[in-house]
Image: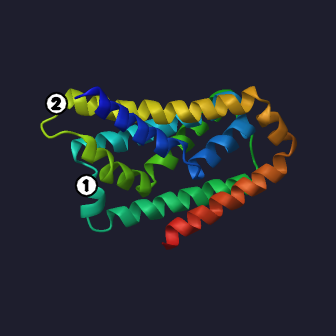
Amino acid sequence: MEPARWLAIAALCASGAVTPGPSLAVVVRNTVAGGRSRGMATGLGHGIGVGLYAFGAVAGFSALVTTVPGLRRALALAGGLFLVYLGVRSLMASGGGGEEEVQGRGFREGFLTAFLNPKIAVFFLALLGSFVPDGSTLGTRAGIAALAMVIDASWYVFAAAALVGVGGDRWLAERGRVVEVLTGVLLVVVGIAVVVT
């Protein structure tokens, strides 16, 4: 595949990753609540979730989301309810847990935020699949999916590290309850919107 097509795919994936939304809210919340390691684990989990959809798109599997009756709606319900769950947990601000548990929770939340988001599946199905030339080898297809995963994970890991690097996590932590409430309300509102639409 020619370099210009790889660059176009990279630009497409980067534009999808840097668009603010619930994923960034979850990364910021986890960075403030659990520090750099939890924020970076969240970004890594999100990248892997995106990578699965990207591989599904280039392999043709993500067409299932639009062709199997009820699958997209089931994903939307699961994703919306998961965001509501995260929002309620943020509003309750329980925190706590050991370092490994905190990192594991961050990873799981990042992965599920991506994996239970049908908009990501549709994004990759509608856009990424059209960039794959007919007759592409499995290696090329896997490379495209890996590129999407690395770009997504890199962006969110960078966001978590940058937040800590500029002291934003401390500034937000000092306003911890306000951040938890605002993040919780945002996630609940987005989750409910996903469920009802």
Q: Quadrant of residue 73?
A: bottom left
Which residue bears the numbered disc 1?
63
Residue beneath the point at 57% across and 47% down = 23
Q: Amino acid at mark 1?
A: Ala
Q: CA distance from mark 1 to mark 2?
A: 19 Å
Residue at 68%, 30% (x, y): give it.
Answer: 162
Q: Residue furthest left?
A: 135
Which one is in front, 144 or 52?
144
Seen at 23% across and 29% down, the residue is 140
Find the residue positioned furthest to the front: 4
- Left or right: 183 as drawn, with respect to 136: right
Q: Label 2 sits on what residue type? A: Thr
Q: Which sits in the foreground, 131 or 168?
A: 131
- The residue at the point 51 percent across, 68 percent down is 195
Q: Say which element carries label 1.
A: helix
Q: Nearer the viewer, residue 164 or 91?
A: 164
Tell me: 55 left or right of 139.
right
The image position of residue 44, as x and y in percent, is 52, 32
- Residue of label 2: 137
Percent across and percent down for residue 63 are: 25, 55
Disc 1 residue crowd, few under 14, some 14–19, many 20+, Cα 10 Å? some
Q: How many marks?
A: 2
Q: Is residue 151 visible?
A: yes
